[in-house]
Amino acid sequence: EEAALVLPHIQDAILATSQELYGSRLRILCPDIPRTKKLLRNKTYWSVSEPSGTVHFEESSAQVELTKFFISAKIGRDDAQKYARSMTLCDEIADLCSLKEEFDVYKYCDPNMSVWAASEDFRKEVLKEYGISRRGDQRKIVTALDKCPPPPPAPKENQYLLGFFDVRNMDRARKESEKIRLSLARAYLTVEDHDMSLLSEISYATRGKRNTVLHIAVYGVATSSTGKHTVAFLKGGTGGEAYPEPDKIAEALAAVCTRDDGIERGSIECVFLNTPKGDEVARLLKNVYSVPFVIFWKT
């Protein structure tokens, strides 16, 4: 049990160290603890090889894509994997599309220059930064990138998720908000979040928005004055933990949502009640107010 509690912190430290200092080339030896090895095997981003217990990081889809590109450019497999790993661990080069965009930005647009000469700054400032210093490999990569079709234009960002986070646990709220933002950014889906505690703030914050997902992150089990499970919003104008009844919360949330029957209200199509025991509010949203999609925790 102690190993299970400590393990996530060890994983975070190992991952950060490997990425930031060693470019994921660090060999990590696990202690010979059967339970620790079992836990590691159950993690999607770890694999343990016997008998040494050496931990390896699995390749992401972007790494696989870049590796295939480098191999197609006649780079050796080991070097191709090393270059791809080095690039995908930074913020600027996330995938092959990003590398092509970077190449196009650096390359001189002079028809009288060869591709090799036109890409001098790209070779010095980008390829060398990621450990690609051999001129032969640089030449192969530059030639292959020049032949790549231009990346498709970035789609217009769509207002997508509107998040409301409990002000009584800001550390947790910030971590959760950041993970959501990072996950949706690559799909050009925008995230807007608000710190809130009053139910009345929902209507004000959604005014004029075209978001389609409403994420309510309020932590802790809440019970109304009548003993029903509710969401831990505070009632406006009160100084205590006076939580609104489930029907009042459902009514306020439904006012900013679309309806299955086509009646115009707001733009929200999906409500995620990220709060304990949200089933009473969720069932009202779905059964009484015809909100198309409702996600909730029953426990």
Image (cartoon, rainbow, N blue to C red):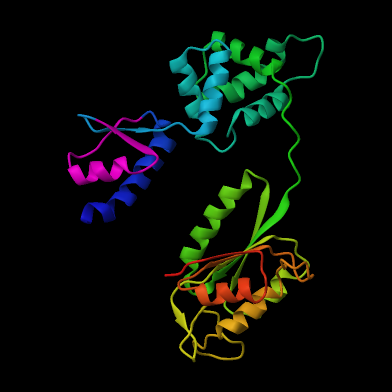
Q: Is residue 37 magenta?
A: yes
Quarter in which the C terminus is drawn: bottom left
Quarter in which the N terminus is drawn: bottom left
Q: Is residue 183 visible?
A: yes
Q: Horizontally, is 49 left or right of 128 in the view? A: left
Q: Horizontally, is 126 left or right of 103 in the view? A: left
| Residue 59 sits in quarter | top left
- Taking 100 as reference, is 258 above or below it? below
- Taking 267 as reference, is 23 above or below it? above
Residue 38 or 141: which is nearer the viewer? 38
- Taking 184 as reference, is 70 above or below it? above
Residue at 52%, 22% (x, y): give it: 67
Residue 221 or 229: which is nearer the viewer? 229
Q: Is residue 15 magenta?
A: no
Q: Position of residue 94 (x, y in %)?
A: 58, 34
Q: Is residue 129 visible?
A: no
Residue at 74%, 25% (x, y): give it: 150
Q: Position of residue 35 (x, y in %)?
A: 21, 46
| Residue 111 sits in quarter | top right
Q: Position of residue 226 (x, y in %)?
A: 49, 91
- Taking 159 as reference, is 256 above or below it? below
Residue at 57%, 14% (x, y): give it: 72
What stretch of residues is rendered in magenta? Answer: 26-49
